[in-house]
Amino acid sequence: MLRLRAVCPFSWRAFQFRSCSCKPLITEMIKCTDERQIFDLIQKSKAILSEKQVECAFNILWQFQKQKTSFLKNVECVRDHPQFITLHNLATSQMEFMNDDTLVNVLYLTQQCATETHGLLVEALVTEAWRRLERFDINMLSKFSFCLANQHLYFSPLMGKIADIVHRKLETIEDLRSLSILMVNISSLISQHFQDQLVNKTEHLFDTIDSSQVNVARRIVKFLRNIKYSYYPLLERCNTVFLSNMNHLDLDSISKILSLYHSLQFHSFEFVKMAKKRLTEMISLFNHPHSFVKLFVALGPMAGPEEKEQLKSTILLMSEELTSQQALAVMGAMEEMESRNSHLNKKIASILHKHLDNYKPIELLKITRALIFLHFQNKELFVKLRELLHSYLKISVIPSEISILVYALSILPSPYLDEVEVSRIEAVLPQCDLTDLNSFATSVLRWIHYDRTYLDNTTGKQLKLLQKLDHYGLQRLQKCTNLNLLWEELKSLKGDWFAESLLEETVATLHRLMDDINYKNVAEIASFLSRTNYLSTLLLDRIASVVLQQTEKIHPFAILPIILPFSILNYDPPQSDEFFGICVQHLNSYLSVLDPLVLVFLGFSLATLEYFPEDLLQAIFNIKFLAKMDSQLELLCSSLSMRVQLRLMELNRAVCLECPEYQIPWFHDRFCQQQYNKDTGSMNGAQQQIYKMLAEVLGGTNYVKASVLTPYYHKIDFECILDKRKKPLPYGSNSITLGKLPEMHWESNTQITGSTLPPGAERIALEFLDSRAFCRNIPHLKGKSAMKKRHLEILGYRVIQIPHFEWNSMALSTKEARMDYLRECIFGEGKS
């Protein structure tokens, strides 16, 4: 009895105030040490068991189950035992005598004891609870909503009734634990306004909970995930709770929190670092697939090389025991880990192959995508995958499911669709949102590319389908009247079809809904402009205006995505000094809180715009910060890690060149040398044309250098030197080969002064600018290209930029015209 009381003190307290007549039998129940004893007691006493004793029996059975690990639970034995059925019958017959608390508790416990979610007892208890619903207190209401959620009744009228009660009583609710349960369970049914009310109420009550309330904090984050709202103030406070309780978090909790953060795109370096340490300590603790797969999925993508090998070798040893869902989870983690362990890849693929018939369409897409990403080759598996996808496609009627199936088919080798399948796509197009339409278009374009490349054929049905996709996409945008709903469809859109067919109309729709941009969605609209490289001065001015008017409501975490489009697109809004000044000021109190990579990206974005806040730079360029950043780089995937390092180098270069008064040292020589040693240095066709013509204009190949590295490692396409009379000066020895690696011919140090040139001579840098250097919609130079021009001028160059649209224009369609163009750029004269 003492053991059971120690394990479940709540259960003991719950029954110590029962009526005297109940106490002896309840005391006997609590003394039981296993299910057999409790069932024997039920058999002996079934004729006299009260509703409270029935509740106690369910509760103790559940406590026995909770003491066992998930893979040792004997739920079937309990569920099928004759006395468990007796207990069910007793609960049914005594239901009307139960008080509200007992009724809801019995419902909860019967579900926990593995009763069928739609069995007669459960249905009867739910019906009786519905009848009493209005008189439930907040605690009973939350427990009842949890029971409905266990039955997946998220969209039921009954859950709607609970949402209505919460809405009416919200002002009087003071229990955040109960409210957090309700928030999660009703989140699918509530309006935007009600969501905001719940978020505000949660903020108000947050300080009433103890700092150890991890489950409450986790439910709050889950609610934010469900309503797709990355509300930073609450996420921060929940994150603080998680960090302060890290030593007590188990594998399940850490795994769930990481998954929620990933969905919300919330990044906490401190949490990830501590979670990695805690999970690494668990590697040797688990030897059963149920737990180890969960550990593999959570730790694998952020583990170090040694831990990854340990995880892979262990999962390989237990691979024969994996279920279909466990194998799927492992494959997904291997994709994130960029696994190159061919033995493990083959083993997991063989398990997936064995269970392939049991997977849903979305799971088949995950499998297909992972196999393609990992360069896995197995003709038999791909044939089976294709057959299954086609069979699902012929019977599916749900637009999102059909788009998933078509997309999966399109990334398999030799993609094709027959007439019936094309007709099925066409039939659902009127019901599709932009996400589905974009998925279909991406698949059709991949299909067209395959047919042109391998079959030298494009059928009319493909082009006709694209036209219909254009039509329905434009129609959906034109009918849109809600900015937040539009954003839900826009946020994941990418690819050629969207850029070519819908981008202009999307921006026009955003212009139409521009008055709805506010502090909640301003960062999202800004991120859209960054992603699409579309310069809309109207939208950027509106973004700046919202920030100036509602600064205090915008969280510092949102400043980076807000600044980014101005940096990328090289645009200064009206009152630009005030706008950027407020953004920087808003960040200052958070410099010690923001993740290292966010600070680096912020510093670089501002430097692109010629803003160099001293506090921000001092926060970045110090030994403590750089050490912290190095530790974060270990947690990132290789591509993101390299991107962060490049941005830090570029920021370091910008500060050294544009703000020498800060006396921040240049410390990227070695990094740059390593990067440029990997550079293939190949020229494109236009650059080769320009090089040959420059040699003719200047008088020979010894008067021009190609692929030159300057001090601070800017790479320029071509360099030449003119004396004070504008005559080209030859280089000492020059045997340029097109495609040769970049060559640094100045001194190897970074001193700008002291490069030997005759008096009055000038260095000229010629850069060919392709479409990536300009905004998508107008020939406006983007931020990085403008910054590079500034830097080259500081280094003493006269910079000549040759835009692709000028070089490839009709006016320069002949060699003579291009030669004259180059002479004009270099010498300021036309024909010689």
Image (tube, rainbow, N blue to C red):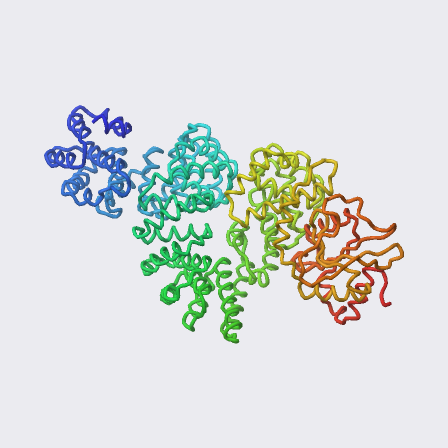
Q: Is residue 757 visible?
A: yes
Closer to the camera in the image, 409 or 61: 409
Q: Residue at position x 11%, y 37% from top?
A: 43
- Residue ID at (82%, 65%): 699
Between 699 and 549, the one nearer to me in the picture? 699
Is 307 situated above or below 467?
above
Q: Position of residue 133 (x, y in %)?
A: 31, 38
Say if residue 579 shows up in the picture: no
Q: Residue at x 47, y 52 (%)?
A: 338
Tell me residue 591's x, y (percent).
Answer: 60, 34
Farthest-out residue, front: 733
Residue at the image position 89 percent from the left and 57 percent from the top? 725
Q: Residue 54 sits in which quadrant?
A: top left
Viewport quadrant of the N terminus: top left
Number of labels in the image equals 0
Q: Is residue 497 above or below residue 757?
A: below
Percent of width and height locating residue 787: 71, 49
Left or right, 779 with reference to 18:
right
Which image quadrant is residue 26 in? top left
Tell me where residue 99 appears, x and y as whole percent.
24, 33
- Quarter placement of the C terminus: bottom right
